[in-house]
Image: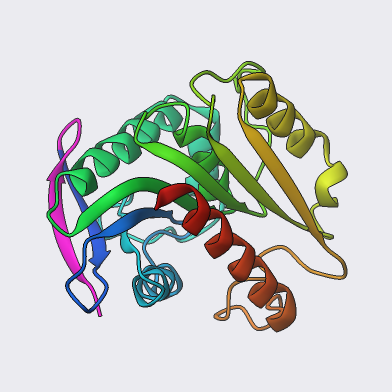
Amino acid sequence: MGEMVSYRSQGAAEGYLAIPSGGAASPAVIVIQDWWGLVPHVRAVVDRFAEAGFVALAPDFRHGEPASRPSEPRQMLNSVQMDEAAADIAAAADYLAGRGEVAGKVGCAGFCAGASLALWSATRSERIVAAAAFYPRLPWDGMSAEWSDYAGKAAVIHCSEADGTSSDDGVQTARSAIENAGGTCQTYDYPGTAHAFFNEDRPENYDQRAAATAWARTLELFRAKLG
């Protein structure tokens, strides 16, 4: 459904873009990959957002090279690459806002490490006003307890039971930081779920009912905040 596009960030950047059919200008969503890069699951989520009426873009932080083991992208959460990735997301938001197919505001959805980035991205771009985080890895080393620029913005965090649910210290730290910065943050627990319960390509973890509920709640957030 989509295609690879190039845009300017700190250097040249690429991403997978999908545009809704029908021709009407639409709000936009940035989709942030999990450990493994711009894999088929991430592309499929981009396509699903387009089918739901959003212009969707997944930046390719790994430049076409999927990670071979979790330790590679996991290092991103503990280094300056976190800020670099956030800058790339902000550039993606600017790119989307400049496209003729986009009207309205920008949201950000992410998975695992990408979920942490999705939450963080709203502190780095005025254009990003809503974030949906699926089972984020929180906190990361050096994460500030004070998040800026969240006033008037909103986030939802979808929490698996395997990750400790919304009672996890990292989730509560992020929620408090968002609320203290003037934003709103709703957490949802999915009993009996494993990490990556949204990923159909991981049948050992996938939970159809939880995935459908989390997807509906994410669309509800974005339709309320981005239109």
Q: Residue at x 22, y 61 (%)?
A: 25
Is 205 or 174 nearer to us in this picture? Answer: 174
Q: In the rendered image of this protein, does residue 149 appear above or below residue 66?
A: above
In the rendered image, residue 4, in percent from the top left (x then y), is placed at: 18, 65
In the rendered image, residue 225, in percent from the top left (x then y), is placed at: 48, 47
In the rendered image, residue 188, in percent from the top left (x then y), is placed at: 77, 55
Q: In the rendered image of this protein, does residue 202 appear above or below residue 91?
A: below
In the rendered image, residue 183, in percent from the top left (x then y), is placed at: 61, 30
Count how many numbered circles sit on residues in the image: 0
Q: Residue at x 79, y 34 (%)?
A: 172
Horizontal side of 74 relative to 51 (left or right) equals: right
Residue 34, can we see it?
Answer: no
Is 4 or 214 nearer to us in this picture? Answer: 214
**Quarter of the figure with residue 170:** top right
Horizontal side of 89 relative to 219 (left or right) equals: left
Q: Residue at x 34, y 35 (%)?
A: 127
Q: In the rendered image of this protein, does residue 129 appear above or below residue 191?
A: above
Asked if the stretch drawn in magenta spans residue 170, the answer is: no
Is 45 or 142 nearer to us in this picture? Answer: 45
Asked if the stretch drawn in magenta spans residue 7, the answer is: yes
**Quarter of the figure with residue 155:** top right
Q: Residue at x 63, y 63 (%)?
A: 217
**Quarter in which the N terminus is drawn:** bottom left
Magenta residues, start to end: 1-11
Residue 200, can we see it?
Answer: yes
